[in-house]
Amino acid sequence: MDRFEVAVAYVNSYTDPIPADLLLKLYAYYKIANQNFEHPGSQSELINAFKANALIQAQKIKPKKAMQLYIELVDNQLKK
């Protein structure tokens, strides 16, 4: 497993609440890293709007940079 996959697995197994702003950044970086630009699939229009906004804010980030930023967020915000 590479560092990005380890970070994703860590987030997926994380049991404490994650602040919404951090969760949205992780969401955007993950989607960009995986080059998955499908419409957010939440049942809530409001949640979809927040997710879409997070993707728009991060749209100029390249996939490799998104992986790096995802790893840094996990290391600096969740593993501290």
Image: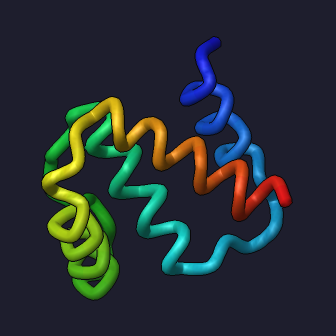
Q: Nearer the viewer, residue 28 or 73?
A: 73
Q: In the picture, which quadrant includes the C terminus?
A: bottom right
**Image coordinates for residue 30, horizontal then vertical, percent:** 40, 44
Q: Nearer the viewer, residue 47 or 27?
A: 27
Q: Nearer the viewer, residue 38 or 43?
A: 38
Q: Which picture quadrant has residue 16? A: bottom right
Residue at coordinates 49% horizontally, 79% vertically from top-left? 21
**Image coordinates for residue 75, horizontal then vertical, percent:** 71, 49
In the image: residue 32, left or right of residue 13: left
Residue at coordinates 43% horizontally, 69% vertically from top-left? 24
Color style of the picture = rainbow
> Is residue 77 positioned above or below 46 on the image?
above
Q: How many marks?
A: 0
In the image: residue 30, left or right of residue 45: right
Q: Nearer the viewer, residue 17 or 74?
A: 74
**Image coordinates for residue 38, horizontal then vertical, percent:** 15, 47
Residue at coordinates 32% horizontally, 67% vertically from top-left? 42
Q: Which picture quadrant has residue 65? A: top left
Q: In the picture, which quadrant includes the N terminus?
A: top right
Residue most extreme to the bottom: 46
> Is residue 53 positioned above or below 37 on the image?
below
> Is residue 39 positioned above or below 48 on the image?
above
In the image: residue 23, left or right of residue 32: right
Q: Which picture quadrant has residue 55? A: bottom left
